[in-house]
């Protein structure tokens, strides 16, 4: 393991001020597992509540998990957990849910994470229903990247998939994101056989003159979604083969990027990304860890359980203990998921941990 340099704000004469703001400067080495994978990327869920009823995630709407009176991570707990990860090499944080913008303090959460200069990228994955109203505020607070879930460019099919007649609202939200200064927007599309897998040309026409990275995500089996998976799963290789035939070129992947294979074409302003968790060696480049909205560390989206961090997030002064617990947990991270065997772990639906 290699030591990670401290952020510039913790150097020289400003060091004491940095310590007072962020706590004791860490000497913990970068988070690394037994397979030499380094973790630059934290996916932090801040709620499991969602107002959409997507067929592949929450077809019956949001149902509280566990106790009815559970509490989600507070603003200060979010500061502490992201500070600990940043001090051990994490440079990208993605805020997820559920639908993260359902938290009333969402803009404050963005600002709190961005207090730490070591977090170079702060992204959110959203269903987009509050984009038009709030995206300018999010960008002003420090949000640097945006993923919006859109599974169809047909308004009626969008309604059928999400349970919400909000297609036009979400599309206006994407326009608002560009107006707010985002140079690129990523759009997540869950790839489903006989639903949208034959719509590639429609999506390509949409991104021809728009700086949108459209990401096709293979439908993944969850504990609640086995029947739908068997009906609608299709490999992203079908899309990849079409792209290559049309002259799209695979791009190199940066160390803090997500798992997408990204393709570009000289005739298009937009890009295509493919996320294919069933492809061989998908897990070999894993660079991300997950923390749930209730403060559990998850080493894999489809793992068997979580490691509680909540007791070490209650107050300042626990950062080294927190980092030590995370580092020790990495010794148990498996080399791969077991989706091919139909083992979905504890993930009953994709809002449970944050997708």
Image (cartoon, grey):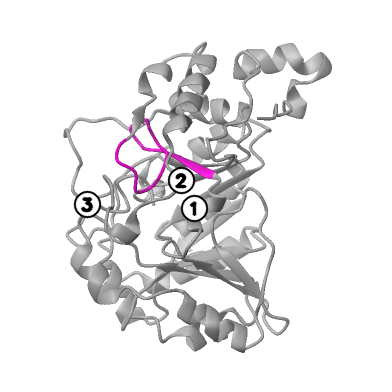
Q: Which span is picked out in magenta?
A: 288-305
Q: Is residue 304 magenta?
A: yes
Location of residue 332 in the rendering, given as x and y in whole percent from the top left corner: 42, 33
Q: Residue at x 69, y 18 (%)?
A: 18
Measured Cα–Cα span from mark 1 to mark 3: 29 Å
**Dot 1, crowdedness within 10 Å: few (<14), some or many (≥20)?**
some
First along the sequence among labels 1 and 3: 3
Q: Is residue 7 left or right of residue 173?
A: right
Residue 134 in sight from this viewpoint: no
Q: Is residue 96 left or right of residue 352?
A: right
First along the sequence among labels 1 and 2: 1
First along the sequence among labels 2 and 3: 3
Q: Which residue is mark 2?
A: 335
Look at the numbered discs 1 and 2 and tell me whether their residues touch, using CB distance below 8 Å. Answer: yes
Q: Which residue is mark 3?
A: 62
Measured Cα–Cα span from mark 1 to mark 2: 7 Å
Q: Which residue is mark 1?
A: 283
Location of residue 46 in the rendering, given as x and y in whole percent from the top left corner: 39, 39
Count of picture labels: 3
Measured Cα–Cα span from mark 2 to mark 3: 32 Å
Callout 1 secondary element: helix
Q: Residue at x 62, y 45 (%)?
A: 140
Residue toward you, 317 or 206: 317
Q: Main secondary structure of the magenta part?
A: loop
The relative height of residue 213 versus residue 126 in the rendered view (above or below) is below
Callout 2 secondary element: loop
Closer to the observer: label 2 or label 3? Answer: 2
**Dot 3, crowdedness within 10 Å: few (<14), some or many (≥20)?**
some
The relative height of residue 82 versus residue 149 in the rendered view (above or below) is above
């Amino acid at each position: 393991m290699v030591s990670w340099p401290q952020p510039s704000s913790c150097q020289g004469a400003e060091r004491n001020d940095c310590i007072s703001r962020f706590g004791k400067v860490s000497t913990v080495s970068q988070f690394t597992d037994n397979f030499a994978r380094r973790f630059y990327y934290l996916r932090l869920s801040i709620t499991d509540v969602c107002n959409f009823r997507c067929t592949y995630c929450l077809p019956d709407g949001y149902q509280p998990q566990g106790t009815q009176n559970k509490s989600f991570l507070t603003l200060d707990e979010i500061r502490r957990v992201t500070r600990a990860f940043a001090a051990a090499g994490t440079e990208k944080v993605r805020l997820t849910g559920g639908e993260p913008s359902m938290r009333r303090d969402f803009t404050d959460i963005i600002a709190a994470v961005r207090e730490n200069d070591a977090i170079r990228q702060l992204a959110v994955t959203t269903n987009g229903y509050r984009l038009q109203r709030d995206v300018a505020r999010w960008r002003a607070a420090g949000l640097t990247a945006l993923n919006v879930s859109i599974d169809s460019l047909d308004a009626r099919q969008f309604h059928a998939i999400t349970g919400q007649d909000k297609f036009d609202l979400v599309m206006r939200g994407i326009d608002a994101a560009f107006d707010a200064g985002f140079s690129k927007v990523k759009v997540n599309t869950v790839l489903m056989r006989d639903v949208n897998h034959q719509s590639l040309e429609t999506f390509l026409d949409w991104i021809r003159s728009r700086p949108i990275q459209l990401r096709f995500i293979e439908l993944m089996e969850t504990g609640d979604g086995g029947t739908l998976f068997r009906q609608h799963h299709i490999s992203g290789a079908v899309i990849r083969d079409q792209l290559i035939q049309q002259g799209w070129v695979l791009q190199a992947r940066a160390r803090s990027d997500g798992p997408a294979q990204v393709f570009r074409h000289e005739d298009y302003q937009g890009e295509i990304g493919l996320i294919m968790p069933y492809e061989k060696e998908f897990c070999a480049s894993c660079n991300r860890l997950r923390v749930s909205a209730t403060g559990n560390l998850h080493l894999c989206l489809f793992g068997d359980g979580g490691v509680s961090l909540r007791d070490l997030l209650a107050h300042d002064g626990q950062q080294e203990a927190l980092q030590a617990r995370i580092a020790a947990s990495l010794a148990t991270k498996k080399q791969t998921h077991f989706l091919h065997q139909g083992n979905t772990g504890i993930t009953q639906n994709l809002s449970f941990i944050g997708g």
